[in-house]
Image (cartoon, helix red, strand yellow):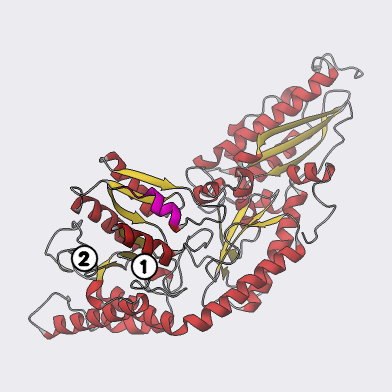
Amino acid sequence: MKYGERVIDHFTNPRNVGSLDRNLPNVGTGVVGAPECGDVMKLQIEVADDGRIVDAKFKTFGCGSAIAASSLATEWLKGRTVDEAADLRNTDIAEELSLPPVKIHCSVLAEDAVKAAIEDWKRKNGRAKTDQEAGPGR
Amino acid sequence: MALKRHIYLDNNATTRIDPRVLEAMMPYLTERYGNAASKNHSFGYEAEAAVEAAREQVAEIIGAAPKDIVWTSGATESDNLAIKGVAEMYREKGNHIVTCKTEHKAVIDTCKYLETKGCEVAWLDPDRYGRVSAEQVAEAITDKTILVTLMAANNEIGTLHPIAEIGRATRAAGVFFHTDATQAVGKIPIDVEASCVDLLSMSAHKIYGPKGVGALYVRRRGPRVRLSCRMHGGGHEHGMRSGTLNVPGIVGFGAACEIAAAEMPRESERLTALRDMLHRGLMERLSHVTLNGHPTERLPNTLNLSFEYVEGESLMMKVSDVAVSSGSACTSASLEPSFVLKAIGVPDALAHSSIRFSLGRFNTADEIEYAIERFAKAVNELRDLSPLYELAQESGEAGAGSGGK
């Protein structure tokens, strides 16, 4: 099975590889998957006071599709609000990368990683602020 | 930039046809197109003569007599014929088969099928290098055992079974011994007499011959093995395997065996040196690299390594101009990691991080040097991407950078 162009692009030039300081209150960290399964994704978001994601980083242990899916997710997250980010579906990722059926689970894991990062940020910051409630962070 | 041909280090999967083999085959793909079973004209005679000459060449490389060789479509068919053939023919005598968890799927799936038909199978556990001992075999044999089937060399990790010792044990117990020698033929010396082997599967496309042709060695004396036929229809190969013979393929197979036998001593030394150079080169540049397979009792060309913290398929994708294979789940349709690595006790995370390098006749030292540099660079780049490597560094398990271990 040859890889699609977009997967190869994200794999060869992954966007936003790295780490944010997980101890910072405005950073949400999600770690999903397990080494025994061959897939581990760490995805982090840095959220500004107005609820907008200003930075996102990832690190992934997994196949080309998994790396591409998490890279794409971080790219997609930057500039969106936390609420908008919660709407990200694995099907969006799978479609964008033209993932074959056997690799769909990589996009599911990426969605899980995003949700885990959001949950972590929410937990550290009380309930998520919507655009109407935008105000100084805690 | 010139278009570079990819480097092929996946010779256990298949091999390129040697130009000398192709040359031997060509007349039988062009003017000499007779059916070897056509008894009444020159087209048939010359095809038959070519088949019989090839039979001698194939028999020679395993120390057998030509009459003991049955042509098949490949080792998978040979395995099926040997195992099902014995099980059915000797079912009055018993229904117990002894094999190992690291066999090729052609053996495993055949044994699993026979389990559904009332056979009992003892699935022996190999040691951490993938070896089963003659003692284990002797202990597993019961008065209902009709066959022991154990491969001569493992396709994934290259580990060699102690075939001669196992053969002596099975002979002493009066049980037939089949060995799937697909990966071993042409790479290491094989002697069916000295090793008390009664059935042996082999395939042309692993030794620079064409795909679609193989053979099964079936002992005729001391003891005689009879097989229940799988392919009916004309009684070819003494009734053991009907079907028009693949004359060009068989001619190629014979030529491949003759070449492999002549070049084996020098070639196995050359391959061992290249394999060890690859191993050393990677170990010098990288930490946390482990060998899967026996350190010495191993095929001269096979090197299966786990690169911790890096997943196998992503590594292959990064080094896309070198062809290898991996025991990672991501490379299999079933999303299961290599069952061979699992059977020898490799933890799943390391199985997902494994790469099998299998060298061959057409690989050069330059190619190996290139592969070393590419893989070392790729592993480091993927470790920079890896949350597991980051964790290990934070906890002090992994060094700050690359380095020998």
In-front residue for pair B276/B394: B276
In the rendered view, does B267 fall on the left or right side of B174?
right
Residue type beneath disc 2: Arg
What chain is tagged by disc 1? B
Marks 2/1: CA–CA distance:
23 Å
**For the stretch drawn in magenta, what is the main secondary structure?**
helix
The quarter of the displayed image where residue B302 is located: bottom right
Residue B367 x, y percent position in the rendering: 63, 74
Q: Toward the viewer: B75 or B46?
A: B75
Q: Residue furthest left?
A: B40
Q: Quadrant of residue A66?
A: top right
- Res B224 label: 2
Q: Which residues are magenta?
A: B135-142
Give the numbered dot on residue B203. 1
Looking at the rendering, which quadrant does residue A105 occupy? top right
Is B47 situated left or right of B258 in this image?
Answer: left
In this rendering, position of residue B303 left or right of residue B215: right
Tag count: 2
Q: Are marks 2 and 1 on the same chain?
A: yes
